[in-house]
């Protein structure tokens, strides 16, 4: 492990422990693919085709900004769709309202409408069971049995700082509309100090396999419609200097980056 000479910074609320969510995986890959195709036929593209599929090529006509924020190309919702969002169980009223407030910010970026409904019949179904936070990615939510959650917030409370609500809610809803973790982008190239990472997440109850799957694993370039790695993405968790070799680190991203906005407006154009 190389020696670090990083200056100490003032710790902001929520920065003492890096809480990372889990990308939930649909149990049946065939069912996942079927859900994606029936939702949006241009989700399925030939390997290596990038944006060559006609449906997305038309959406990108005349756009020359770089592509960022890693979106799993097989799991995007139909552009212009209304997604009903329901809360399951006994969700604190203050927590519920803050989730609605921050989730709604996605509607300023993408051509999707989030319709928060009473009852349990939503495409996105939220619980607040204590523990971890997680979400299914995009159309994988269609494979989950009615009445079962597709997203969970495990550490948000009425006293959680707004900065943490912004970070976590924008991030989880990014997953819900088709985005992966940016640190698992194929071009990320983060110089992880693996022993330090294993030790750090062991303190949070993660075993080595969970660290391998959620921290070190990277998507293949053929799986994504993204080409540029973005350290400032809302889908990127903080990477402290102490968990890398050399002096690489990523700060605390709590809002959309410019590249997040540019890319998501491509895949969900107005």
Image (tube, helix red, strand yellow):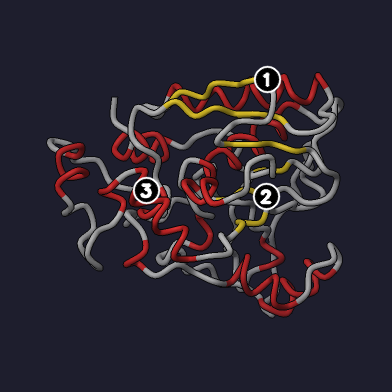
Q: CA distance from mark 2 to mark 3?
A: 22 Å
Residue 71 appears anywhere in the view: no
Q: CA distance from mark 1 to mark 3?
A: 35 Å
User: Along the polypeptide, which appears first: circle 1 or circle 3?
Assistant: 3
Which label number is shown at residue 68? 3
Q: In the depicted view, which residue is nearer to us: 217 or 75?
A: 75
Which label number is shown at residue 183? none
Look at the numbered discs 1 and 3 and tell me whether their residues touch, using CB distance below 8 Å. Answer: no
Q: Residue at x 21, y 52 (%)?
A: 51
Residue 95: x and y in percent read: 78, 25
Secondary structure state at the residue bearing disc 2: strand
Callout 1 crowding tier (Cα within 10 Å): few <14, some 14–19, many ≥20: few
Q: Which residue is mark 2?
A: 134
Question: What quarter of the picture does the C terminus occupy?
Answer: top left
Q: Which residue is mark 1?
A: 118
Q: Residue at x 32, y 44 (%)?
A: 40
Question: What quarter of the picture does the N terminus occupy?
Answer: bottom right
Q: In the depicted view, which residue is nearer to us: 86 or 214?
A: 86
Q: CA distance from mark 1 to mark 2?
A: 22 Å
Look at the numbered discs 1 and 2 and tell me whether their residues touch, using CB distance below 8 Å. Answer: no
Give the label, 2 or 3, closer to the camera: 2
Quarter of the rendering containing residue 2: bottom right
């Amino acid at each position: 492990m190389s020696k670090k000479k990083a200056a100490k910074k003032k710790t902001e609320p929520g920065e003492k422990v890096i809480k990372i969510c889990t990308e939930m995986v649909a149990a049946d890959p065939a069912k996942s693919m079927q859900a994606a195709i029936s939702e949006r036929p241009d989700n399925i593209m030939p390997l290596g085709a990038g944006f060559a599929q006609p449906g997305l090529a038309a959406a990108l006509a005349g756009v020359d900004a770089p592509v960022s924020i890693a979106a799993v190309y097989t799991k995007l919702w139909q552009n212009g769709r209304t997604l009903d969002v329901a809360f399951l169980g006994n969700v604190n009223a203050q927590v519920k309202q803050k989730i609605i407030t921050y989730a709604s910010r996605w509607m300023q970026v993408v051509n999707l409408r989030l319709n928060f409904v009473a009852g349990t019949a939503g495409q996105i179904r939220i619980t607040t069971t204590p523990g971890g936070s997680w979400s299914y990615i995009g159309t994988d939510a269609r494979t989950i049995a009615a009445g079962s959650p597709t997203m969970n917030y495990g550490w948000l409370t009425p006293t959680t700082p707004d900065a943490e609500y912004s970070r976590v809610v924008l991030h989880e809803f990014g997953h819900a509309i088709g985005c992966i973790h940016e640190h698992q982008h194929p071009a990320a190239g983060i110089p992880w100090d693996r022993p330090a990472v294993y030790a750090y997440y062991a303190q949070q109850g993660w075993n080595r396999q969970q660290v391998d799957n959620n921290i070190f694993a990277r998507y293949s370039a053929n799986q994504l419609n993204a080409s540029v790695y973005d350290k400032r993405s809302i889908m990127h968790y903080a990477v402290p200097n102490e968990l890398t070799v050399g002096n690489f680190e990523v700060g605390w991203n709590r809002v959309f980056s410019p590249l997040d906005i540019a890319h998501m407006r491509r895949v969900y154009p107005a």
